[in-house]
Each structure stands twice: as structure tokens, then as C-alpha cells.
């Protein structure tokens, strides 16, 4: 190993892992870490010259001359706030298995100093019991991306949980699909595609897919199909035909309505702190949503959907009183 060429890389790694604005390194500390970790010796002038070289290559390093404390790396690939947000999202995500979550978080924390990484681990590392136990999750994503790019048909086993909380096949026959796109929606990652035995698009949770195979046969993608339009009105990703639905809501859930259905819906302010909202959704999806807001929301139209909601509520009342 050419020690002269290795010194700037070693300095950069030390600054990346052992320094930040609250923990600057002195010249003597830098020299000591160079020798202990990498067996490299750098005199004062050599150290200064290599730090200047790193600065010329675009690395934002604060020096003793600037801060009167020591040396530390200012700008990183990710800012601490960005790493914090991404790591929290990974940890909270139920679709990413626990071991893969830890690997991703560790990789992100390596972009920060050891002090910031330690502080994050102390705050966040608690067990998330909602994590998927499908070890094939990231392998599935790689295979599906390859299939989409090459327009290859796929086959796979689609699973569900049994009473032992294990993923088991939904049926003996493998599922077949022409894959179009991967879409994140409703805190889940879905594959959108076309089953040539059915009209329209279908969707499948990637964390429930196993044993994905790329077939040799190719397919022609329909030009007039947009997977993002497909998921836009799929509340909770329920399948079915979409229809225009009119809701009467209490102002207390205005934020919830806009958060769920977006800002393009029609809203009409009424008297007495109420409003009407006109949305487009599948009937099964809006039924599931409306049942959670029965205290604050009524389905007005279509009439068949309103009557179905009345039937469900009447049956639920009878069942509750019967226990």
C-alpha cells in the first residue's frame, strides 16, 4: 500500500466517523488515529497538506484556523435531520423485515459521526412487532424491477397468515402476471400488473409474495394504462370499480378527509360546521373508511351504497346487543 496516497483517504474516514461540530479533532488526535487505525504517520505539514487536498476536491472540512477548536467534517451525504427521518421511516415500516431494517439503518448511520449514530440508536432501537417476516422482500424487489425493465412475465406464490402467524400459500396454483410498476401506497409496497385472463389491472403486496420467477416469455404493455391513476382512488387498496361518492361530514374530520382523499376532491361548506365531500373511490374501500367515521360521516350517494351501510350498521347493533 502506498502510504502517501492512503493518507487523505484515511483522514477522510476518520473525520467522517469521529468528528462533528460538537466533537472536533485536534491535530494530535488526528495523527494518533491515523497511526492506531491505519499504521500511517503524518507530520504536521503533511497533515495540513492532505486536509487542504480534500478541501480542493470538494469536502467541506472546518479547520482549527476557522473554529479555534479542531477539525471536523461539515457537509455529509445526508444531514442529521435527513438521516433521522429516513431511519425512523425504515424502523416504523412494517413491510421491511427487522434484520434488513437494521442493515439499512446501519448503512445510513455510517454517513454520520459515531456520536450521532450512538444517540440515534439509543432513541430508536425498540422492537417493532409489526415487522414482516418475509425474508425474500428485497430479493422480490430486485427480481420485479428486472422483470418490469425487460417486460418479462412473472409467476409467484402469494401468501397469507395462518393461525400460527406463519405465511402460507393462498392456493396451490402459482399466480401469473405481466408486471407494470412498483407503487408505495397506504404504508405498503405493491406490484401493479395485468393478468391476461382478466380485464384491467391487479395489485399484490410485495411483502406477501414468495418464490418469484421471471419467465422467458415477454409481454407488450398496454399504452393507455397508468398504474398511478389505478392506485389514486383505491382507498386501502380495495379492488373493484370506481364510482362517484357523496359524503356528509362533520368539520372535525376535514383534515382526515383531505389527508385520505387528497386536495383534488370537491368540498362544499354547509351550515352548522358540516360539509359535503364528493370523491371517487371503490365502494368496498369507502365502506371500510366510512365505518371508522360513523360518528362524523354519512354516505349520501349512491343510494345502494348508503343502504348497504345501513344494513351493516343494523346487523352490527343486533350482534353487539346479542352478546
Image: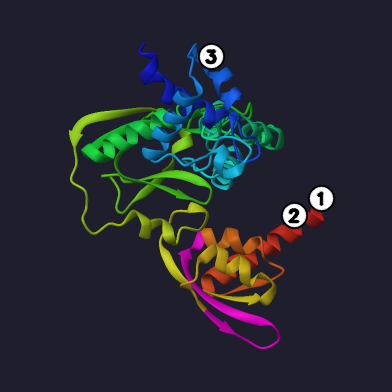
Looking at the image, is mark 3 or mark 1 earlier in the sequence? 3
Single out the residue that lies furthest toward the front.
45
Residue labelled with disc 2: 319
x and y, in percent, of residue 48 in the image: 47, 30
- Mark 2 near mark 1, Cβ–Cβ under 8 Å? yes
Between 103 and 97, the one nearer to me in the picture: 103
Q: Report x, y in % for residue 244.
A: 45, 72
Question: Taking 99 as reference, is 286 above or below it?
Answer: below
| Magenta-colored span | 267-284
Q: Residue 311 in magenta?
A: no
Residue beneath the point at 56% across and 26% down: 99
Dot 3 falls on a residue whose secondary structure is helix
- Residue lying at the far bottom in this picture: please name it: 271
Give the residue number, with chain letter if any, for mark 3. Answer: 35
Q: Residues within 10 Å of mark 1 (few under 14, many from 20)?
A: few
Dividing the picture into quadrants, the one containing residue 129 is top right
Q: What is the quadrant of residue 49 in the picture?
A: top left
Quarter of the figure with residue 231: bottom left
Amino acid at each position: 500500500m502506498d502510504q502517501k496516497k492512503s493518507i487523505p483517504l484515511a483522514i477522510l474516514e476518520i473525520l467522517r466517523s469521529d468528528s462533528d461540530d460538537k466533537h472536533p479533532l485536534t491535530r494530535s488526535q488526528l495523527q494518533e488515529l491515523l497511526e492506531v487505525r491505519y499504521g500511517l504517520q503524518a507530520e504536521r505539514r503533511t497533515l495540513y497538506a492532505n486536509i487542504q487536498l480534500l478541501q480542493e476536491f470538494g469536502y467541506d472540512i472546518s479547520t482549527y484556523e476557522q473554529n479555534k477548536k479542531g477539525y471536523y467534517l461539515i457537509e455529509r451525504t445526508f444531514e442529521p435531520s435527513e438521516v433521522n427521518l429516513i431511519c425512523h421511516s425504515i424502523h416504523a415500516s412494517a413491510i421491511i423485515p427487522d434484520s434488513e431494517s437494521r442493515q439499512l439503518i446501519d448503512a445510513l448511520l455510517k454517513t454520520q459521526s459515531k456520536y450521532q449514530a450512538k444517540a440515534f440508536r439509543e432513541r430508536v432501537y425498540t422492537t417493532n412487532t409489526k415487522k414482516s417476516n418475509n425474508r425474500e422482500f428485497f430479493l422480490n424487489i430486485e427480481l420485479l424491477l428486472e422483470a418490469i425493465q425487460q417486460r418479462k412475465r412473472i409467476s409467484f406464490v402469494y401468501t397469507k397468515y395462518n393461525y400460527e402467524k406463519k405465511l402460507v400459500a393462498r392456493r396451490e396454483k402459482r399466480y401469473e402476471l405481466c408486471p407494470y410498476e412498483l407503487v408505495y401506497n397506504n404504508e405498503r409496497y405493491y406490484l401493479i400488473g395485468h393478468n391476461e385472463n382478466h380485464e384491467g389491472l391487479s395489485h399484490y403486496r410485495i411483502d406477501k409474495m414468495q418464490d418469484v420467477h421471471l419467465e422467458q416469455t415477454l409481454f407488450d404493455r398496454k399504452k393507455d394504462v397508468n398504474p398511478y391513476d389505478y392506485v389514486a382512488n383505491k382507498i386501502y387498496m380495495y379492488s373493484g370499480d370506481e364510482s362517484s361518492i357523496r359524503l356528509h361530514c362533520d368539520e372535525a374530520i376535514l383534515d382526515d378527509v383531505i389527508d385520505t382523499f387528497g386536495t383534488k376532491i370537491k368540498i362544499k361548506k354547509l351550515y352548522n360546521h358540516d360539509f359535503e365531500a364528493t370523491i371517487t373511490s371503490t365502494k368496498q374501500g369507502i365502506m371500510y373508511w366510512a365505518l371508522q367515521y360513523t360518528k362524523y360521516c354519512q354516505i349520501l350517494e349512491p343510494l345502494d351504497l348508503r343502504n348497504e351501510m345501513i344494513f351493516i350498521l343494523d346487523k352490527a347493533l343486533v350482534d353487539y346487543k346479542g352478546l
